[in-house]
Image: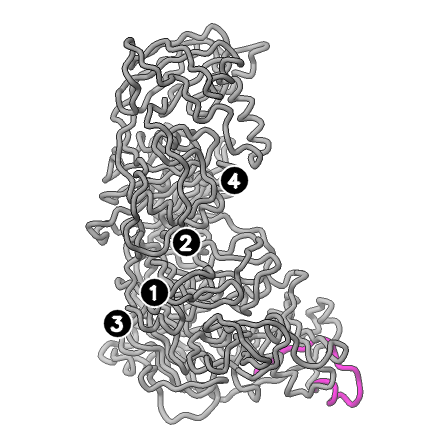
Amino acid sequence: MAAAAEPGARGWLGGGSPRPGSPTSSPELGAGSRSRSGPGSGPGSGPERSGSRPPGPAAPSHSFRKVTLTKPTFCHLCSDFIWGLAGILCDVCNFMSHEKCLKHVKTPCTSVAPSLVRVPVAHCFGPRGLYKRRFCSVCRKGLEAPGLRCEVCELHVHPDCVPFACSDCRQCHQDGHRDHDAHLHHWREGTLPSGARCELCRKTCGSSDVPAGVRCEWCGIQAHSVCSAALAPECTFGRLRTLVLPPACVRLLSRNFSKMHCFRIPESAAPEPGDGEDSADGSVPAGPGREVGTPESGKQTLKIFDGSDAMQRNHFRAVTVPRLARSQEVLEAALRAYYISEDPQGFQLQALPTPVQLGDTAAAGRVWSAGPAEEEGGRAAPEAWVLRALPRTQEILKIYPAWLKVGVAYVSIRVTPQSTARSVVLEVLPLLGRQAEGAEGFQLVEVLMGSRQVQRTVLADEEPLLDRLREIRQTSLRQMSQTRFYVAESRVPAPRVSLFVGGLPPGLSPQEYRRLLDEAVTSKAALVTVSHVYSAQGAVVLDVACFAEAERLYMLIRDTAVRGRPLTALVLPEVLHTKLAPDCRPLLVFVNPRSGGLKGRDLLCSFRKLLNPHQVFELTNGGPLPGFHVFSRVPCFRVLVCGGDGTVGWVLAALEDLRHHLACPEPAVAILPLGTGNDLGRVLRWGAGYSGEDPFSVLLSVDEADAVLVDRWTILLDAHESACGEDSEADAEPPKIVQMSNYCGIGIDAELSLDFHQAREEEPGKFTSSWGSGADLWGSDSDSRFEKPRMDDGLLEVVGVTGVVHMGQVQSGLRSGIRIAQGSYFRVTLLKATPVQVDGEPWVQAPGHLIISAAGPKVHMLRKAKQKPRKAGPAKDARADGAPAPEGDPK
């Protein structure tokens, strides 16, 4: 579990502030050098280093107690076995420790972790899955049942723990809120393999038994949480620094667009936590693998709600307590269930009538003021309770600056019934060194740091702040712990959102596209302009000067079809190309998730975490065009295509069409073979297919690959007439012109490919290789009539087979094909409808001519370097690549 989110201002997050409602003599600055905090302190107390560094010794605020162990247990700090029968356990977050390790604990308790987040960034949770040897970042228990993972960082959680997860995902772009140029480490706890070694002390720091050790999610260095404090805070992106698109070079003003929309990630259909889930047990366990307390027969389970919103949704946490527990014990258990570490004296439990338990929200206001069973005069205690905060006449509130270059992280001020948003701004500005500026240039912003979305709301000047805090607590006590207030400049960046719209009819003018969109979604002309038109691809890019209009258009376009074709809508970032380092050549990654038995889905997630997710594009969501548009102003970049030969041809064709739009018109292209043929991947030494290699090692190979030239061919399909009768299947013809990189098959070869293709479409998971992948049709025998084939010789080889038996012999290596010709221009006449395939993509072609000729400039490809010692860097995957294919012509 990370202590904080993204790197931010210099200085420390100060501590020592009184609990809400306690007296104080003067406003307090958050200066870490004077901070003190201990277990049980209120949320936010304790120091925090910028850049997600685990906090100092006083910051964790755990509720530790000594417990008796009944099963084998490991320390969460040193990961060693705890010998004996006694261990130290946090009652709130289940952190387990040796008694000797207690003084070194730096990992914060879940109850205070949200207050330590420097820059709140929401997570992108994908569908539920089984994640072995992973631990929940909230309750620290293993993910034995299906859990959730963030698609951008290494956060894993149980479904019912999602509401309590910190909004501490990686900050992958500038959005106008606390942007920065310096890049510091972003630590994440508990994602290390058991053999991981600390960067500082070189001792083992990982474990498969408990969440131990930390790892930077940008550069990948690993360390003990204690040792990480001694490492340099700046992150250099590690071995992949030349491939990563730095967050400081990406701008996306997204406001309330979800991170799933910003990163073009399909939204999960998983239900929200608490919606009738079988696993919504919110009890506070004593720790993994042990039993503490009285037997189950002497306990009772209560449903605890944390506010009005939870009652309306019927979202509760189940708390198991002894049947003879007093009111104070039940109250403390309820606070722990919601990860609240404040003084229990500021809260009370109110019993709910039975209709509320059944979903009748009309009775929500009629609550009982009595406590649990022993105060009920012998009556049976109700099963459901609501946790409420007692009224407060004043509070101590932390106010954060929304700019970075300031000596403190926050200031603490007293809020009274007379305090308004304007009066708070007036009081805070002198404490932050901005007293010389007029208060009219600043505003108070309320930020809800949800794990799924970070929402910002500007408060009205006359908003009574104490009433606002009371309203938030009435809605949800958990929401109060995730709410923060910032003083921000009223001057905000001019809204500008780029929307990519695909699926439009090709070949129209800019005016026709604008008129077509106006008819479909009724855009506002004063706020929307067409900035780029890709007529051949049937796509446009809209610049929208209003956040609300951008959100409206995005949702409408996704549900609109034009001339029978559904439209595609994507939110695109802007790459600040002038800020890129001279040696930076970011990698543009395209992944076809349907290729290679659906292995592309896992690679999508891996590459998003190893790189910046803004440089990873899913080809089934808009094709290659959005990626090339985002990188159009990058002076030098490379491309990685994850898919089969057809996918590679698709990307290369798009590159050929868009070359004149790119500042880097000839980017080198690498291949990660996922398809069923992968002939081009074999020749370029990338192997016959992907078999689970470490994605980090794949990226290293791309960085070290050699640039080579490869021929491209154009095929003109000149059909004389449409097929009819028995040949009616030829009606669905491909475009008139197609591009070819590897081979064109006519006749029996294409017929088998067509049957194979149709079977693969029905069950893609069962087809991960092709019948002829890797077959050498030309053969290795020398022949004085022909030149030796090469990838860049500008010549195409024509080979024939006599039938299925001959093809089987070629596949088994017993024979070669019949060499017919070698040249740069061919004309083939089809007398009847005939199966044809190009780079593994088959169809039935109507009678007519096929004219094959060399295309324009050769394409720049990356050929995997031969095995050699790796450069210094993080530990690599030791698995050897498969034997390289012969360096012949892929055609």
Q: Residue at x 32, y 45 (%)?
A: 587
Q: Secondary structure at mark 4?
A: loop
**What colour scheme was applied to this rendering of the protein?**
one colour
Question: Between residues 681 and 829, which one lies in front from this camera angle?
Answer: 681
Q: Which mark is residue 199?
A: 1
Q: Which mark is residue 405?
A: 3
Q: Quadrant of residue 6?
A: bottom left
x%, y% of residue 739? 36, 24
Q: Which residue is mark 4?
A: 598
Q: What's the distance in space between the residues labelled 4 and 1, CA to CA?
A: 36 Å
Q: Secondary structure at mark 2?
A: helix
**Disc with the residue nearer the chain's start (4 vs 3):** 3
Q: Which residue is mark 2?
A: 609
Residue 607's place in the image compared with 837, above or below, is below
Amino acid on which the number 2 mark rests in the picture? Lys
**What is the span of residues highlighted in magenta in the rendered image?**
371-389
Amino acid on which the number 4 mark rests in the picture? Leu
Q: Which label lies toward us, 4 or 3?
A: 4
Q: What's the distance in space between the residues labelled 4 and 3, CA to CA?
A: 47 Å
Q: Quadrant of residue 639?
A: top left
Q: What's the distance in space between the residues labelled 2 and 4, CA to CA?
A: 19 Å
Amino acid on which the number 3 mark rests in the picture? Lys
Q: Is residue 386 magenta?
A: yes
**Disc with the residue nearer the chain's start (2 vs 1):** 1
Q: Is residue 134 magenta?
A: no
**Disc with the residue nearer the chain's start (2 vs 4):** 4
Left/right placement of residue 94 relative to residue 799 reads: right
Residue 777 can be seen in this image: yes
